[in-house]
Amino acid sequence: MPRDDIFEPVPSTYGPPLQSRLIMAPLIYLKNNICSELSPHDENVIRRCNAAGIALLMACLLPVDFQDGMKGGEPTFPNLQATAKFINKNGGQSIVQLHQKTLHSCTKSGIRSSVSYYGLAINENQICSTEIRALRDRFLELARHAHAADFQGVEVNATSDSVFAQFLSPIVNKRADRYGGSLRNRSRLLFEIITDLRSAFPSQFRVALRLSTDWRGSSPHEVREITTWIMQDEAVDYLEIAFGSADITSESSVLQNHTSLCAIEDINLCSVPLGCSGQISSVKHVVSLLDSGWDFVMLGESRKS
């Protein structure tokens, strides 16, 4: 059934409203070197998205790169400003994604596991509070690069391949300090970084969050719990729920997931727009998701086989 409000503004928590209920994530720098210039194809995608009324363009992913951060390395993204300028010039609004991959994959190069290596590491293999502080600072540093380049905001990636999934997981996270144990403690780093970003920039600069539902050992109860806290804190401009392949094998599974989330008392009274992403491949699917109550849908550029 057609919807008349797909291209109407959606109020945001802090910044300007989303221009429509569709966000596009071509993630240009995932396909190209992060220092490369925009290709003609990239420019064409940006023009078409802007012309179509897409609310936001997530143009690239900035790797937090914990190893370089601990060495005090200065990130350089020479074409970041040019990318933002091109999007802005063509009438779009742009954000970048901040992503730190899971840290246990770096152990061979001397970087200690973030929490415990799939639940097997002992305490001395965990990063210390000083290193956690450095990780928080690194997120803030890259957000400042994005802000200086004239992007309109950042999205923190807290999906299953991120460091946050390690902390959130009751299986992986065996810490005995304030970052382990209860879900409140396991989610502490995520909320600290969101608070850092929200406090560092003007309200017009978007701070958003992408959260997955499939960190190791996650349960529907914990997913609902952390979603409730995020929505009630109202510290982000929007929350995107990224469903794993097992959660989105059919349209009905995503609709049921949204029904489960929105069954939380008072969650619909919060001002934070709630959207979803993951293998959404048809107009019918988009309309079904919006009809079920999602505020927006995040789309990716289709992959060529």
Image (cartoon, rainbow, N blue to C red):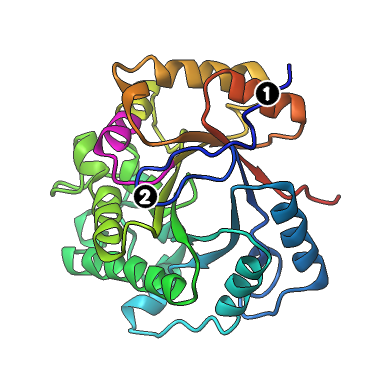
In the figure, residue 247 lies in which quadrant? Answer: top right
Residue for point 32% across, 23% down:
269
Residue for point 75% across, 35% down:
281
The quadrant of the rendering that contains the N terminus is top right
Crowding near pointer 1: few (<14 within 10 Å), some, many (20+)? Answer: few
Crowding near pointer 2: few (<14 within 10 Å), some, many (20+)? Answer: many
Q: Main secondary structure of the magenta part?
A: helix
Residue for point 45% across, 59% down:
154
46 on left or right of 269: right
Secondary structure of the residue carrying numbered label 2: helix
Tell which residue pokes out farthest to the right in this image: 305
Q: Magenta span has 234?
A: yes
Do the residues bearing badges 2 and 1 touch, measured as CB atoms within 8 Å? no
Q: How many marks?
A: 2
166 on left or right of 287: left
Amino acid under disc 1: Arg
Q: Is residue 97 visible?
A: yes
Query: Which label belongs to residue 189?
Result: none
Find the magenta span and give its range: 226-238
User: Where is residue 18 shown, x and y percent of the image?
Assistant: 52, 45
- The residue carrying mark 2 is 164
Query: Which label belongs to residue 3?
Result: 1
- Separation of residues labelled 2 and 1 (CA atoms): 36 Å
151 on left or right of 13: right
Amino acid under disc 2: Phe
In the figure, residue 262 lies in which quadrant? Answer: top left
User: Where is residue 35 shown, x and y percent of the image?
Assistant: 62, 80
User: Where is residue 233 shown, x and y percent of the image?
Assistant: 25, 38
Residue for point 62% across, 33% down:
245
